[in-house]
Image: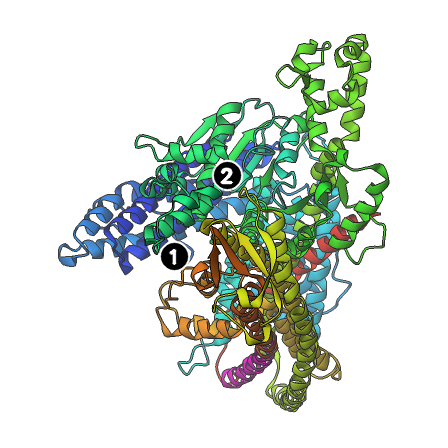
Amino acid sequence: MAEPISAVLSIIIPVISVAKATLVMIETQAQKEHSHNDALKDLRIAVDALKRDATGYEILLSSILAAPDKRPIERLCTDPEGREAMRNLDVAFKAAKLLMEQNQVNAVSGSAGLYGTQAQPAAKRPPIRELVFSFLKANFKPDDGTEWSIRDTAKDLDVCRSNCESAFKMTWHLYVIYQQAPSRRSTVDNRNHKGELGPALDNVLSAFNHKPFSVSPEGDNRVRYSKLTVLNQSHEYAKAHEELMRRAGKAWVDERADLQMTNFQTGKTISRIQALGQLQTSLFEVLWTSTVEQLKRHGSNWAEGTGRGSANPEAVGFKNDLLDLEKGLQEAILRAKKQRFAIAFCGMVKAGKSLFLNALIGEPILPSDELPSTAWPCRLRHVPNQTIPQLEFDDAPFISGIAALKAARYGARLNEYQPPSDDVYDVMFEEETEEPSPEEVRMKELHAQWVDLHAATKENLRLFEQPNYYLPSKATGHREVKDLLSKLNDVVRLCHRFKLNFNMEDVEWPLLTVEFNSLRGHQMDGIYEFIDLPGIGEQFESFDFESMIRLVAKDSNAIVPILSFKELSRSDWKKLPEIVAHGFGNRTSIVVCTHLDQIGGRNLTEQLATVSKVFWPRNIPGTTTGIIPCSSLMGLSARALLDQSKRSKPPFKLIWDKNKKQVEYPCAEKILGTGQPEETYNRMSPETWRAKLEINLSESGLPDAINKLTREMVDQAKQRAFLSESIAVCKQLRKMSAAQERKLLEARRSKNEFDEAKREYDAARAKFFQLIDSWNVAEHQQKTNYHNRMKKGLTALKNRTDKHIADAISQTLRNWTLGSAPSIEQHASDQRTGHGTNTRDEGRNVSVLVVKSVHHAEEFLRLSQKELQGSLNREKQDFVTAVRKMAEEARAKRFQELKDEFARLDPQIQPELREEIIEDLNNQSVDIRQVIFNHIKNEIKTTKTRHTAATAFRAIEEKLAKPLLSQNEDPVQVLDEGEQKALKTVDDLGFMLRAPISAMATIPFVFGLPIWPWMAYSKSFHLEMNIIESQYRREIVEPWYRILQEESQKALSGTIVASSEVAREAVLKALSREDGRYERESAHKNSPTKAGMVQHMVAMQSNLYAAEAALTEIQYLLKESINDSQS
């Protein structure tokens, strides 16, 4: 019975394919021709929207075919209503296919769009791709009517998309209704209301029980207009209606929650969390296909202004909120149907991320240990029974990167480059030195980037530069996947290292599919992916880890930091919780600590307590349940040997490395020892051997890690995901309901009631303004308090700077590797030349650095500056983190003080309006980034053609951050007045709030050898230490400190000012909206109400009340389940 579904899918898939090809052609041809045109842009938007919708429909229809319960499909394909819906869906997508492939339109019955729009037959036009190609080649000359054809095509695509949406939603709504659990008689009644109210309540309750959340007088003869009218006749009736529908919504959940745990056909039981998730998704589907469509048709009946030609801002807000609700519902449904769960792993470089994932896979595929580190994210998907790994990826950015590397030829040039000699006696043969040419300087800079690259990366660079080299688009097999993955990482690493462009965003990350050895035999629900991220230390000027985390947050359900027990003595990993929380939006619940085998048992408890304190400072001291200690290498080797030992012990030669003359597997070496491993092995029975391997596997911590990641963490993350989606949708429904409720109130209250309400509002409005004035006064005191605290931090920072200079010089001397080590000598001040002479030093001994060549002198200055740069970078990151925390605290305090002022008012004073104001303040003040965005939103809105408000904000952030992330001071370009205002506003807040912490500390080499006083005795070179230190202080440290001082004060003041302005604006806008409501209601009191408007609004309100109550009940049950799982 699924043939009609398969038939529609066979039409949708070509539509998606043609749309993708069309978009690629538009983008590539437009870039090639360097052309931009509004008509072409509209076409691209229309094609992209159709592709995006069709992709979602494909996922949903495929989920129908995969569903174990086939009864809903049978009903959909056999019931008259279902057959009609399927026919309309088939017709709509055939029209879409015809339009995409041939650019032809047929007027077909049964495919009218949401508002009855229908595409009309058009004159014959060339196919879309031919049309675009000829248009670009003609250089946008509209003489032949091509531009008009493109505009008409875009309009037809919009109509076609609307028709497909309408047809699909009707089909999906019926499927969801057929899919509902067998209904029992509802436990809800109207509580014996008498008179005309009782039958009216019975009528709407009966309609709800027949079609939950779809009460409507349209197409349902159960719902009577007269009964709906009764429910808004008085405040008492309206309250009874609300109370009944909320009970109905709650009962809908309670009656199905337990039933949902058992599949009606297979009898299979699922977890309560999964059952609640399915129930919530079912509710979302009904809201998306029915309630939202009802709101689109009738929710804007009151959205036509005051009758004097002015736009109704409340109606505009309602429509925008409705679009947000529709989008949020669709995204939640698609996430549920995909059943994809992704965990991202992050950490410092060489923390053992890739090794841990290799242990999960059971095969060393990802680069780890001796190989270069991960430079580009990789998605790893567990596919049961797929024993041969396969790697697929979007090759476009990598091909562009390789083309840039080929053009630059850095590998060939550096292969032939001869750096200055390290031989100290070469100075005997040097000619008079001249100023180096720009090319020599550039080659020296490139060599500094080249010299510490891994040998395998250098080899790959030379390979990429070969004229006939091409990058395969996928790989199959263990060796092939490992080799290709290494090349992809090196393309990214080399492009960033040599400052060549590589697009980091809007690129599908490589996908590696294989059966995970560790998950073999586990019953998995849905698709499981792990994401391997670059380490935080893998730092490039055009790349920062926080931006990567923000990208990951869009595509994953949870993030797990991985630490190494070997590195816990360092301090850099302690920034990880803050970076993850800032990028991902919340703190992690699990941390993996690797290299368990390299830590003593006595230190383990202390180390775990340290990690717990850093990641969860508010936890009870000693609580370490969120930490998973493991030894990836031990686990990987134990599992590999267990696989080899399933039937019998493998020959000893298979576990012996004859070249290194040692046991190859770490766990085997632990079992057999190093003295006489072969004799020990031969004496051991197969049973004992396997038992010891099992013990080592268990002690490695790997099985426990797998269980926590695939069971506990997945369940917790699902709970949080369901709960957050429920809260978000409930919040949007409440906004819809509040707007409808206000209009119903206006429709039923008398002129006298209106006048009394207006007087109460005017009195409250005056109180609100007094409250804002008193709150404004507190801003100055708050600034003073925070600036005093900042001064203490700056004093502490300044006291540490001299220590950094001395440490950088001493560390450089300790790490010297250029043959003959430099020495420190004491010279009398009168032995010096006039370079940098200070009369105060005459007659005193000074410390002089003695080196053997110009090259050594240059190298000392370069290395010591690099060492100083590193220590100042770390100091700066710590300081900026502290400033951010203080700014975040100031922001929260500013908003909270205003919310507290409103909360302290008499509860009887405008409670709904006060609740609306506090809700607006909460929405405006999520974090500093949100405050900044809201602060500049109005300016950004003037950007007419290139951005939405949110994407414009991101673009501005990138433009502002770019000079901080690169030494190339490209001018910031803004194209319109709105962006210029927004740019200045964000710039005024300082780089501490607009750039990632990990990318803030690029301190360029500000001077070189020529400015240094040095003189030659024989063939050695002397650099006076006091002058080196003073120059470092004057040229590097003092400007560095001044910038931090200025920027920290700017960031703090900017945060407080922006927070005050955004909060004040939120209150004023709420009052302005309320003013407008009273003004419109006053105007409408003398106007007749549209026929049927009130009745439709009552029906919609029935659905909204019930939906909000149902989601509230689901939230309660989810929280209850979370508490049960944690106890």
Q: Is residue 1060 magenta?
A: yes
Report helix, strand or loop for mark 2. helix
Q: What's the residue type where badge 1 is placed?
A: Gly
Point out residue 400 in the picture as x, y percentages from the top left corner: 36, 42
- Left or right of 576 in this view: 1035: left
Q: Residue at x 53, y 32 (%)?
A: 512
Q: 767 above or below 518?
A: below
- Whether residue 160 can be seen here: no
Point out residue 325 in the picture as x, y percentages from the top left corner: 55, 59
Q: 951 above or below 472?
A: below
Q: Mark 2 points at which residue?
A: 61
Q: Residue at x 72, y 28 (%)?
A: 634
Q: Mark 1 points at which residue?
A: 116
Q: In which quarter of the image is residue 417?
A: top left
Q: Quadrant of residue 180?
A: top right
Q: Does the magenta stretch include residue 1027?
A: no
Name the magenta segment's main secondary structure. helix
Mark 2 crowd level (few <14, some 14–19, many ≥20, 10 Å Cα): some
Give whichever of 1079, 139 is nearer the camera: 139
Span colored in magenta? 1059-1084
Give whichever of 502, 150 is nearer the camera: 502
Q: Which residue is drawn at 16% across and 52% down?
A: 138
- Whether residue 703 can be seen here: yes
Q: What's the residue type where badge 2 is placed?
A: Leu
Report helix, strand or loop for mark 1. loop
Point out residue 216 in the picture as x, y percentages from the top left corner: 56, 59
Q: In which quarter of the image is residue 525?
A: top right
Q: 92 above or below 921?
A: above
- Residue at mark 1 to residue at mark 2: CA–CA distance: 25 Å
**Residue farthest to the left, as pictured:** 143
Instruction: Say which mark, if any, is on residue 989.
Output: none
Looking at the image, is mark 1 or mark 2 earlier in the sequence? 2
